[in-house]
Image: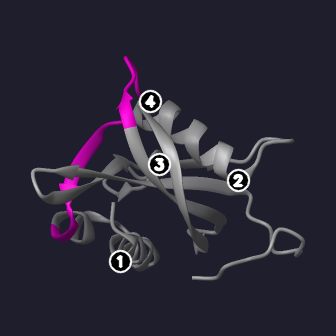
Amino acid sequence: MLDVPAETDERPTHAGGVVARADGGAVRYLLVRARRNPTWWIFPKGHIEVGETWEDAALRETAEEAGVEALPGAFLGVLDVAGQRVAYYLLRPLGELPSAERERRWCDYDEAASLLALPALRAVLARAHTRGT
């Protein structure tokens, strides 16, 4: 995982959110089914639009794909995931929206780690988990 300053040429093209919520003393993480390969579970993410900040893109994509409105938290870094450079943020859920583009699932840390499709996503989950909710 790489933290990239905004002025470099290694800017991300996508942004995503690791949504974490406290649930009875445990932390649960939001996963969605991948569009390209529906057998994969991933974090919500998508293209950064022109004029949009990385953080705003992560919030928008989380709302669109997972149907969860969230508040931004810590920047978790930029990661190469399946050929895309993705800026990830730790997000705190505010509430659920009436529609979502993808199937979603709330998981504890161990379940999320076992379901995530790629080692790089498990690394960003671990980083988010150390930041807490």
Q: Position of residue 6 (x, y in %)?
A: 83, 68
Q: Position of residue 56 (x, y in %)?
A: 67, 43
Under mark 2, the amino acid is: Trp
Q: Earlier in the sequence, mark 4 or mark 2?
A: 2
Look at the picture and state if 94 lies above or below 45: above
Q: Give the quarter of the figure containing the C terminus.
A: bottom left
According to the picture, the residue beneath numbered tag 2 turns out to be: 54
According to the picture, the residue beneath numbered tag 4 turns out to be: 101
Q: Earlier in the sequence, mark 3 or mark 2?
A: 3
Look at the picture and state if 9 lies above or below 29: below
Magenta stretch: give its range. Answer: 94-110
Q: Tell me the distance, in whole angstroms, between the alpha carbons under discs 1 and 4.
A: 29 Å
Q: Tell me the distance, in whole angstroms, between the alpha carbons under discs 4 and 2.
A: 20 Å
According to the picture, the residue beneath numbered tag 1 turns out to be: 130
Viewer-side label of 1, 4: 1
Under mark 3, the amino acid is: Pro
Q: Residues within 10 Å of mark 2 (few under 14, many from 20)?
A: many
